[in-house]
Amino acid sequence: MAASVGTFMANLDASIVVIGLPTILAHLHASIVHGIWIITGYTLMMVILFVLLGRLGDLYGRVRLFNLGFVIFTIGSLLCALSRNGDQLVIFRFFQGAGAALLMANSGAIITDAFPKKELGMGLGTAVMAVNLGNIAGYTLGGVLVTYFGWQSIFLVNIPIGIFGSIWSYTHLKEISQKPVGQKFDWAGSILYCIGLATILIGLAIGDPLSERNIIIIACGLAFFIAVIFVELHIKFPTLDLSLFKIRLFAAGNFAAFLNSLAFSCGPFLRSLYLQLILGYSAAKTGVLLIPMEILIFIISPISGRLADKYGSRILCSVGLAFNAAALIWFSTLNQKSSYGEVLVSLALFGFGMAMFSSPNSSSEMGSVPAEKRGVANGIRMTVNQTGAVLSVPFSLLLMTLVMPYNKLSQIVGSSQLISSNEIPIFLRSINHACLILGFVALAAIIPSLMRGPKVNNTSAPPTTHD
């Protein structure tokens, strides 16, 4: 229950901000750069901290960190609502993201501890339901709250949920994991890892990643990451346990998840632009129209989790990725005269695809690792997923700039007004172009998904080469 509330909160605030973004930028007189960081800064903080917090959870208790996450997230939500300009909101979104990281980094490990292996897919499927319930609520509440109560209300709504979650988790959630004896926290590896990952992601997310400035930033980040690998290979108890990638199930699942997240995570952003700025729908109507996708994920995820428990993850995940690719490619064909029925086809494909992929892939990854490493394994898993999410919106904008100049794109996205008729064709082509390429990225994810191997019944020890 508590783990589900935590994942619900973290995902509520991701989707609720996407719907309200055009209004937020207009009211705060903020730029498209602020818009990118309002979305990605929240996720970036989670990406940086996931592995570190997962390792801390293994060493000192997952429940303790999870409880702290509720408190920080609730305070961060209040600070976001009090923001007076784009810079302040970006900073407070980072703080809020730290709370979300504490909630998400250990939720998967807590659930894995609580469920027997033969029911793990169902347990993680229930967690995916909470994730998508948060998305559904975010899309619905985001539009309604922004339209009738102002943009600040999309952050204030978190406060009662956060207070309830804090009290519930503190009184009901008990630590059942076994803490390792005699292991020390790897400060050197953790600091190098955070600096390296943050530097790389910042270089990819601010402006043109191919500019001289950004190439230098990315190169510095890669240098830090090389140092991380060297340190982690020569330390007894590493934060970033690279030995986990020797497990084929874990490695293949993470690679497929990264590509899928890169292709999928910008979907709400692009669909919101299409529905609001091209078709002229309000934020409230846009939020409601995006709900069918999340309802499908909500309904099908536990079913796909049960199927993964029985039949394995390889085929289920690969079919899900194929549906996601079809959804993106279909969306790339929409135009100014397309009906909502045509949009609904894309949403249905997305919903079915994500439901078939997420629960089985999570079960495959978490079920393949030793119990004492579940915290760091879940941290790596979440880092991979959220790294794709962080890069997804900047990557989609980069693809759009191949069709429409950045300055004009920035002007349009940063406005809450319907764009002029003569700008619609090129803006629409830029969205279609991005979706088409992202569709092929989702198709590429099928390759590592299939490489995870056929199902082998093994309940005594985590497999190293088979699923």
Image (cartoon, rainbow, N blue to C red):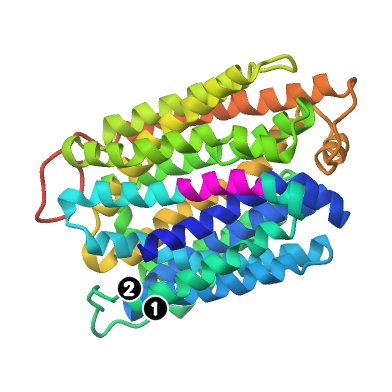
Q: Amino acid at mark 2?
A: Leu
| Residue 242 in the image, given as x and y percentages of width and height | 35, 60
Position of residue 367 relative to residue 327, above or below, is: below
User: What residue do we see at 60% from left, 42% from top?
Assistant: 392
Q: Picture quarter containing residue 229?
A: bottom left
Is 389 on the left-hand or right-hand side of 447?
right
Q: Nearer the viewer, residue 300 or 49?
A: 300
Q: Which residue is the extreme one toward the bottom?
A: 182
Is 309 on the left-hand or right-hand side of 168?
left
Residue 173 bears which disc, if any? 2
What segment carries the magenta color? 132-142
| Residue 121 in the image, given as x and y percentages of width and height | 26, 46
User: What residue do we see at 71% from left, 38% from top?
Assistant: 397
Q: Which image quadrant: the N terminus?
A: bottom left
Q: Picture quarter containing residue 28?
A: bottom right
User: What residue do we see at 56% from left, 68% from top?
Assistant: 160
Q: Secondary structure at mark 1?
A: helix
Q: Amino acid at mark 1?
A: Tyr
Q: Which residue is disc 1 drawn over?
A: 170
Is 68 on the left-hand or right-hand side of 41?
left
Q: Nearer the viewer, residue 12 or 312?
A: 12
Say whether marks 1 and 2 touch (CB < 8 Å): yes
Q: Is residue 428 magenta?
A: no
